[in-house]
Amino acid sequence: ADIREPQPGSGQPPRKLPPGVVLDKDGKPSKASFMSLAHKQAKPSSKASAGAATAAATAAAATASLQPANDCPADVETLGRSTWTLLHSIAATYPKAPSHTQQSNLKSFMGLFSRLYPCWVCAEDFESYMEKEKIRVGSRDEFGKWLCEAHNAVNTKLGKDTFDCSKWEERWRTGWKD
Ligand code: FAD
């Protein structure tokens, strides 16, 4: 089924969309409205009537069946790029002189991350890397370089060029010097 709006001038009346569905520029249900409906379905507010919850559930199901899911779940490359962006951005915003708590939080986060990363082979290798190369969290630069080296170890494993770790901050925090 296709619930795209007919083109203006096509002579067809606009079709009725499920309540709460917002269309993107291309006339397809937007991802945001799908997510919002799915959220409402999971957590109906105390005021919402059973009827409204059912309507939202029906709309979410209708939208889900129309939503092409070819980017879901993310593949290893997309997941990897996004994850490196997150990790290097954490390094870029990590304090120059972190408190004991901040250091401990970062260690815990990275320890859990290496066990939960949803590419199991990647996670296993990364966990072994972390066992060999103890994480350094004493300062922004220390963690930034450690992470850069960890990323390089993956680059090497995948046959990619390594990155010059003296430039990690230019890449992820300050922008290139020239
Ligand atoms: P990415 O490697 O994703 O890098 C993104 C950007 O980071 C680059 O464009 C570059 O500007 C910058 N960059 C590159 N190297 C560095 C560095 N050393 N320091 C700072 N910045 C850098 N894929 C697999 O196929 N097998 C695996 O075992 C595997 N393990 C992974 C483990 C982890 C923890 C993560 C986060 C990802 C892993 N991946 C793995 C995914 C892989 O590393 C890449 O993310 C993916 O192949 C896409 O690569 P890319 O060339 O787009 O750039």
Image: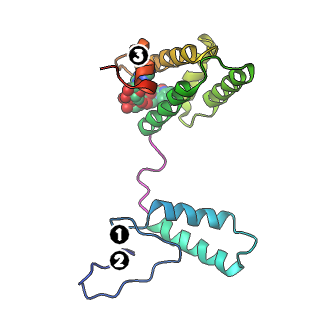
The residue at which mark 3 appears reads as: 167
Is tag 1's residue or tag 2's residue first in the polypeptide sequence?
Answer: 2
Quote the CA–CA distance across marks 1 and 2.
Answer: 6 Å
Mark 3 residue type: Lys
Whether 72 is among the magenta residues is yes
Quote the CA–CA distance across marks 3 and 1.
Answer: 43 Å
| Residue 133 drawn at (x, y percent) | 59, 11
Does residue 177 appear left or right of residue 44 in this picture?
left
In the image, ligand 1 is in what quadrant?
top left
Q: Quadrant of the C terminus?
A: top left
Specify how the rendered protein is coloured. Answer: rainbow
Give the main secondary structure, helix, strand or loop, of the magenta stretch. Answer: loop
Q: Which disc, if any, is residue 5? A: 2
Q: Quadrant of the N terminus?
A: bottom left
Q: Residue at x 36, y 19 (%)?
A: 159
Over which residues does the magenta segment extend? 67-75
Q: Are marks 3 and 2 in contact (CB under 8 Å)?
A: no
Q: Label 1's element?
A: loop
The residue at which mark 1 appears reads as: 27
Disc nearest the viewer among 3 and 2: 3
Q: Residue at x 38, y 17 (%)?
A: 163
Q: Residue at x 71, y 79 (%)?
A: 49
- The crowding category of the residue bearing disc 3, from other C-alpha atoms within 10 Å (few below 14, some 14 to 19, many at least 20), is some
Is tag 3's residue or tag 2's residue first in the polypeptide sequence?
Answer: 2
Disc nearest the viewer among 3 and 1: 3
Residue 78's place in the image compared with 10, above or below, is above
Q: Are marks 1 and 2 in contact (CB under 8 Å)?
A: yes
